[in-house]
Image (cartoon, rainbow, N blue to C red):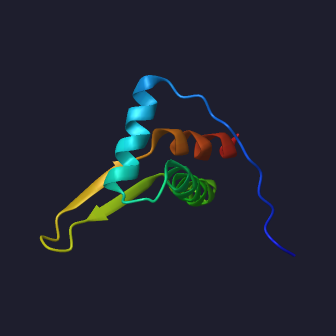
Amino acid sequence: MGIKSKRVAFTFDDHSVRTLEQMTQEGRFSSMADTVRNSLQISRALQTQAKKGFSEIVMRNPDTQQERVVILPHFASMVDDEDE
């Protein structure tokens, strides 16, 4: 069974288009569609973890071992919703 494709069109405001173009360039994606696909995969992975109670990401600079914690408010609210 092959993967089905479906053409989808989005309308972005100017700021969002510039952000998407910047993300495409900085991320070295071949197209804006690839950028959106990658972003959806990341978002889905984060949602899956949020449903398990996780709402923070620890990022580490491997060169300096410095760490930053990124709190994902939307995903934290998903965790709270599951408790109700």
Q: Please state if 62 lies on the left or on the right of 5 as rendered.
A: left
Q: Residue at x 25, y 56 (%)?
A: 68
Q: Of 42 and 72, which appears nearest the observer?
A: 42
Q: Residue furthest left?
A: 64
Residue 15, position as x, y percentages in the image: 40, 26
Residue 73, position as x, y percentages in the image: 46, 39
Q: Residue at x 77, y 57 (%)?
A: 5
- Quarter of the image for the C terminus: give it: top right
Q: Please state if 77 lies on the left or on the right of 2 as rendered.
A: left
Q: Of 47 and 4, which appears nearest the observer?
A: 4
- Quarter of the image for the N terminus: give it: bottom right
Q: Residue at x 67, y 45 (%)?
A: 83
Q: Please state if 60 lies on the left or on the right of 18 as rendered.
A: left
Q: Residue furthest top?
A: 13
Taking 12 as reference, is 79 above or below it?
below
Q: Please state if 53 lies on the left or on the right of 25 as rendered.
A: right
Residue 41, position as x, y percentages in the image: 58, 59
Taking 75 as reference, is 16 above or below it?
above
Residue 31, position as x, y percentages in the image: 49, 53
Residue 52 picture quarter:
bottom right
Q: Residue at x 36, y 60 (%)?
A: 28
